Image: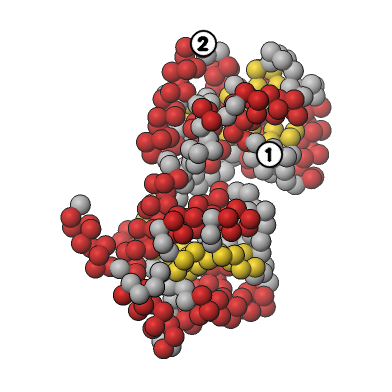
Amino acid sequence: MTIEAETSTGAAAAGTRPPAVLQVLPRLVTGGVERGTVEVAAALVAGGWKAVVASEGGPMVRELERAGALHVELPLASKNPVTMRRNVERLAQLIRRERIDIIHARSRAPAWSALAAARRTHCHFVTTFHNAYGDETWLKRRYNAVMAQGERVIAISRFVAEHVMRVYGVPEERLRIIERGVDFGRFDPERVSAERVIRVAREWQLPDGLQVVMLPGRLTRWKGQLVLVDAMARLERRDLRCVLVGTGDGRYRQQLLETIARKGLGGLFQVIEDCRDIPAAYMLADVVVSASTRPEGFGRIIAEAQAMGRPVVATDHGGAREIVLDGETGWLVPPGDPDALAQAIAGALALSPAERLALAQRAIAHMRAHFTTRAMTDRTLAVYEEILFPAAAAEGHAAA
């Protein structure tokens, strides 16, 4: 260990300077990983810690900096071996310069560079598994395995945790389950004005009096937009509007539009690529659908929709099983089953006003009890504390 690294970690443990955490991820674009990174950084600053984030940048950098965190632009999205090797030294220099105590890797490509930099500087290393990454080949398992190398490995759901233990052999004593949280400062139906909802409805040119089925999510095949198209064809209703919210693969988007036209559903569907007010958009929805054909690690869309009191229909796998109370706060259906999806959507649309209100109350209460941003950030900072201050953490566990 270098003298500088010893001084850095020792000073933080002794309390002579604020402890410092560096989070690394590819980019700061809109998404669950990015949102969690910014939220943890803000919580670190609020708690008197030093928060640093390294990425290739993106629209959320401004939000990060408003929270008082430092952003350093590095080419961490690259999977080029030469760039990744160069990133080791870049991160090592950053660790030394900013006197970082913990480097927290949130994605695989930057994690390889971060692990090497952590070893070089004797910095603590933490990872977060955001999904059960594909492990079909030895090469993929090897690439993913870096995420199992943390002193603490965070999984965003029980589903992901079970995968990490089974496939990568991470023992329970190193594993921590910390579900993503919903920011109730944003996703609260009481805070969304009628003017905001009307503005979105006008931007989308939604006809008055039609019920709205919404599927937010990146336009990619595994998100299940084509399954929803098949489900709506089976419903044989034209008094609805189906809104697909998201951007993505242009070729898939074209295929999606061609399928909609071929099935005679052109007047039923519309694709919205840019939604600047997703809480207001949720308020327009009579049912929010997540039709993913592959298991998702958590399911941010259905979490946010339930926080807004919307009926949700999600596929019965992955993290959705832990978020949706089937038959109470929403419905779970088999993946890739348009008949079951159509039936569940029909049930959601048929709710009476009293039934809809009761479901909304149950969903909001469930989310507020189990899936808040505050709980997520508190538990993440607790992981950092148990690494840097193990004696204090042990005393706290004993007292509890």
Which is in the foreground here, disc 1 or disc 2? 1
Q: Secondary structure at mark 2?
A: loop
Percent of width and height locating residue 111: 54, 68
Q: Residues within 10 Å of mark 1 (few under 14, many from 20)?
A: few
Percent of width and height locating residue 84: 63, 74
Q: Label 1 to label 2, Cα distance in Å?
A: 30 Å
Up/down of 256 relative to 14, above or below:
above
Amino acid type of the residue that numbered disc 2 sits on in the rendered structure: Ser
Q: Which residue is at 23% across, 58% downward?
A: 396
Q: Secondary structure at mark 1?
A: loop
In screen coordinates, is 292 left or right of 13? right
Q: Are marks 1 and 2 in contact (CB under 8 Å)?
A: no
In terms of depth relative to the viewer, which is nearer, 100 or 227? 100
Q: Quadrant of residue 77?
A: bottom right
Up/down of 44 relative to 142, above or below:
above
Q: Earlier in the sequence, mark 1 or mark 2?
A: 1
Quarter placement of the N terminus: bottom left
In terms of depth relative to the viewer, which is nearer, 54 or 85? 54
In screen coordinates, is 36 left or right of 262? left
Q: Quadrant of residue 264?
A: top right
Amino acid type of the residue that numbered disc 1 sits on in the rendered structure: Arg
User: Mark on residue 276?
Assistant: 1
Percent of width and height locating residue 153: 41, 61
In screen coordinates, is 360 left or right of 30? left
Q: Residue under circle 2?
A: 352
Image color mode: secondary structure
Percent of width and height locating residue 141: 53, 63
Q: Is any atom of residue 307 visible in this view?
A: yes
The number of callouts visible is 2
